[in-house]
């Protein structure tokens, strides 16, 4: 079964337990983002069977993620609100720590290329703004200022044909329900 929404939307006592849970909630972007993921995992884990795989993804090392320089725009603009959802670089053991705090047993990890490609700067800006990572910057300044600085930050990633390409490496962790 594929379920969209919070874990409660998947609760069906007549259905078999899940054998796989994927968490498309990358951590390593905002202060405190791992706590929100831990809470989601704590709610989802009881719906999965013993030994079920739980796959987590997060940002890789900043030096391997071209998008890092663009995300720093959000931190710079949101500085007056710093501490409430400001950007931070991913740490090596973020995924393992979240899994362990959620009662999961890490079973394997690795890195995967996850380039962000967009048709143009406007599409890239819309895509990045939709993540919510720029919300504090918009609240601290205004949407026009954020759009302007975001477009400037995207400029180095613009190709001659107008497309925007940002190679990234994400980390993933496969954990098991005990």
Image: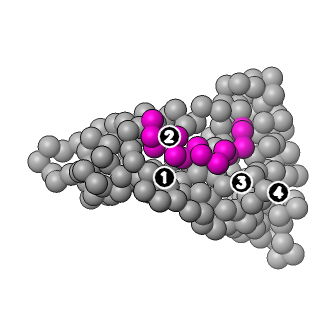
Task: Name the front one of labels 4 and 2.
Answer: 2
Which numbered disc, 4 or 3, marks the residue that appears first in the sequence?
3
| Residue at the image position 73 percent from the left and 58 percent from the top | 65
Which numbered disc, 2 or 3, marks the residue that appears first in the sequence?
3
**Is residue 99 located in the magenta-colored stretch of the structure?**
yes
| Residue at the image position 67 percent from the left and 25 percent from the top | 84
Asked whether, in this view, residue 44 is left or right of residue 58, the answer is left
The residue that disc 3 covers is 61
Judging depth in this view, the residue of 103 and 138 nearest the camera is 103
Q: CA distance from mark 4 to mark 2?
A: 31 Å
Q: Whole-percent x and y of residue 85?
A: 66, 31
The residue that disc 4 covers is 154
Task: Name the front one of labels 2 and 1.
Answer: 2
Label 2 CA crowd tier, 10 Å (few <14, some 14–19, many 20+): many
The residue that disc 1 covers is 56
What kind of element bears circle 2? Answer: helix
Range covered by the magenta-colored residues? 87-101
Asked whether, in this view, residue 61 is left or right of residue 130, the answer is right
- Most extreme residue toward the left is 14
Q: CA distance from mark 4 to mark 1?
A: 27 Å
Please report contact status of discs 2 and 1: CB closer than 8 Å, yes or no.
yes
Asked whether, in this view, residue 153 is left or right of residue 128, the answer is right
Q: CA distance from mark 2 to mark 1?
A: 9 Å
Label 1 CA crowd tier, 10 Å (few <14, some 14–19, many 20+): many
Which numbered disc, 2 or 1, marks the residue that appears first in the sequence?
1
Please report contact status of discs 4 and 2: CB closer than 8 Å, yes or no.
no
| Residue at the image position 66 percent from the left and 44 percent from the top | 91
- Most extreme residue toward the bottom is 161
What kind of element bears circle 1? Answer: strand
Please report contact status of discs 2 and 3: CB closer than 8 Å, yes or no.
no
């Amino acid at each position: 079964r594929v379920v969209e929404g919070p874990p409660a939307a998947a609760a069906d006592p007549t259905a078999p337990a899940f054998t796989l849970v994927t968490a498309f909630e990358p951590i390593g972007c905002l202060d405190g983002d791992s706590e929100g993921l831990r809470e989601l995992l704590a709610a989802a884990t009881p719906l999965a069977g013993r030994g079920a795989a739980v796959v987590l993804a997060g940002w890789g090392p900043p030096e391997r993620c071209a998008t890092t320089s663009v995300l720093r725009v959000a931190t710079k603009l949101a500085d007056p609100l710093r501490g409430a959802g400001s950007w931070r670089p991913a740490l090596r053991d973020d995924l393992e720590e979240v899994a362990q705090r959620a009662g999961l047993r890490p079973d394997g990890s690795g890195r995967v290329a996850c380039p962000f490609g967009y048709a143009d700067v406007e599409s890239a800006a819309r895509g990045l703004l939709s993540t919510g990572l720029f919300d504090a910057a918009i609240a601290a300044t205004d949407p026009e200022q954020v759009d302007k600085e975001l477009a400037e930050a995207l400029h180095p990633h613009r190709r001659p044909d107008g497309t925007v390409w940002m190679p990234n490496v994400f980390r993933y962790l496969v954990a098991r329900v005990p």
